[in-house]
Image: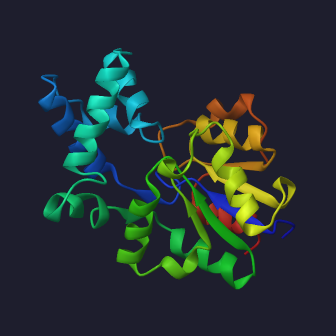
Amino acid sequence: MSYQAVFFDFDYTLGDSTPAIAEGYRRGFAALGLAAPTVEQVRATVGMKLEDGYTFLTGDTNPAHQARFHLLFADSVGVNAQGEDRKLMIEGTVLLPGAAELLGALKKAGVHTAIVSTKPGDTIRQIFAHQGKMELLDLIIGGDEVHRNKPDPEGLQIALDRLGLTAGQVLFCGDTVIDAATAQAGGCDFCAVLNGTTPREAFAGFPYVHIADDLDDLKRWLKL
C-alpha cells in the first residue's frame, strides 16, 4: 500500500449511533415544542454539525435556536448527559461490520489510523474504549477539538501534523459529500464508503480514488 495512514470519518463510516442520535433529536425537539422527526429524517443529518442538522430538519436558521437545540441534545444523550442517558450514546453505538477487522489489518501493516469527525472526540474515545478497541487507533480528532468543522480541513491538518505526515501520504475515508469536500480541501486522496445515506452518484462532483460498497470492499481494495 502506498499510503502511510488512513483517516476515517466516524458516523456511518466506522460506527452507527443512530438510536442515540434519534433519541437526542426527539428529546430536543420535544423541549422546543416541535414535532419529533422520524429516524430516517434524523439519519439524513448524520455527519452534519447539530446546528446544521436542526436547520436541515426545521428550516430555522436562527443561531440562538440552533445553539439551544445543541445544548438540549448534549444534555439528553451527548457530552453533558449522565448515567443511563449517557449510556445511550456510548454503549448503544456499534462498530459497523468489518470496522475492527479493517483497522486491525491496517495496524498490522504498519499503517497509521485516525478518526477525524464532527462527533465529540471524547465520545468517540469512550465508544472505542467500551468496545475494547482503542488500540486500533493512533489518533482521534473530534468536532469539539477544532475551531472549524468539516468541510474545513482543520481537523485533517491537525491529524497530519500530530502524526508527522503530509496530505499526499494519507487516504481519507467517509460516507458523505462533506467528507469528500474535506479531503479535497485538505489535499488528501478520498475514498467514499456507502454505509450511510449518501448515494454513489452524489460523489461524482468530487475527486476520489475508490467508492467502497462497505468496509470489507475497502479492505479488499487496500489489498489488506
Residue at 23% x, 30% y is 37
Q: Is residue 66 above or below residue 9?
A: above
Q: Quadrant of residue 179?
A: top right
Q: Position of residue 7 (x, y in %)?
A: 66, 60
Q: Quadrant of residue 70?
A: top left
Q: Quadrant of the N terminus?
A: bottom right
Left/right of residue 189 with respect to residue 35 in the rendered view: right
Left/right of residue 80 with respect to residue 164 in the rendered view: left
Residue 80 seen in render: yes
Q: Quadrant of the C terminus?
A: bottom right
Residue at 25% x, 53% y is 80
Q: Is residue 99 above or below residue 174?
A: below
Q: Nearer the viewer, residue 160 or 199?
A: 160
Q: Quadrant of residue 151?
A: top right
Q: Position of residue 44 (x, y in %)?
A: 41, 34
Residue 210 seen in render: no
